[in-house]
Image: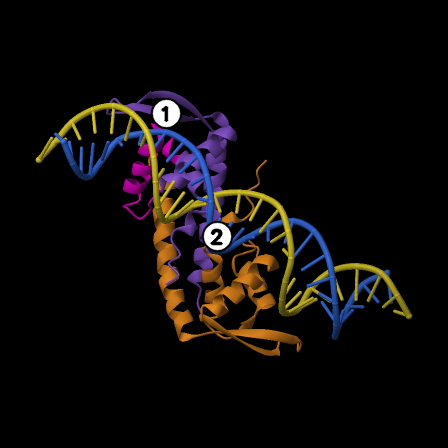
Chain colours: A purple, B orange, C blue, D yellow
Amino acid sequence: MAEPGNDLLRGTLDTLILSTLRGSPRHGYGIARWLEQRSGEALSIEEGSLYPALYRLERQGAIEAEWGTSELGRRAKLYRLTPQGHSALERDTERWLAFSRAVSQVLLAEA
Amino acid sequence: MAEPGNDLLRGTLDTLILSTLRGSPRHGYGIARWLEQRSGEALSIEEGSLYPALYRLERQGAIEAEWGTSELGRRAKLYRLTPQGHSALERDTERWLAFSRAVSQVLLAEA
DNA sequence: CTCAATACCTTGACAATCTAGGCATCCTGG
DNA sequence: CCAGGATGCCTAGATTGTCAAGGTATTGAG
């Protein structure tokens, strides 16, 4: 019981999303698939978390949206990193790495 | 703006707490100090998160409490890992490491 | 013609953290 | 002596992000 689900994503999803936009613009659905694939299926991104996150990031000015077409030629909303988004990504990546190191340090410490 | 605070702790605090009890019993206040120290002050544990987490873990049967005295001879509630808590710790540590690897893999991936 | 995949979106419940308070004891500095 | 910090426990309330579960529309394959 008490399957924790992926509450671990809390506070990390935004950074993950930003990181998928480093190269070229992507649309929401593609971001989710990319994250899952790139993590070796270790991460699963729910759309109910994804789209609100995209609005959040857009509202914060980290990303910008524009309607266009996907690789399959379908109507899709393409997101691109803004300069602020790029800084945020760098900052949050550093923050995550520091946090991750700290946690590992504790969890893997000798008795 | 939008200082994220430590929302990164979400879903990790419980595991961190359990890990502090691997050796010998500890009391709440001591757990917080230990985590902060052991992480090189990278983690900061708020009491408003700590005590509810301890109740949570106790209710789940992962830890047991007993009133006693601290190293300074003061009244303190000492928590100890139960066998279930030990299994949970191992399981959650694995889970966290897998998640952490996945996130790092994405964040540090080539463009 | 049906079903899965692609692609977007929303509502409501839930759970965990933080802020900001509270209490009591002890020790140390001034 | 006494003020304040450290130790130690606790709680109420607000906030916030995730999830489950639904919805729409289009395309392509079988």
For disc 2, the marked residue is B10
Decide: few, some or many residues near mark 2? Use Cα within 10 Å; few <14, some 14-19, many ≥20: some
Is B102 left or right of B54, judged from the image as shown?
left
**Chain of the residue that carries numbered disc 1 in the rendered image:** A
Q: Quadrant of residue A51?
A: top left
On residue A78, which mark appears?
1
Q: Quadrant of residue A78?
A: top left
Provide residue A2's location: percent of width, then percent of height. 39, 61
Decide: few, some or many residues near mark 1? Use Cα within 10 Å; few <14, some 14-19, many ≥20: many
| Element carrying mark 1 | strand
Query: From where the camera sits, is residue A34 visible?
Result: yes
| Element carrying mark 2 | loop
Is B81 left or right of A36, judged from the image as shown?
right
* Stretch of the chain drawn in magenta: A19-45
Provide residue B51's location: percent of width, then percent of height. 57, 63
Residue B44 is covered by the magenta coloring = no
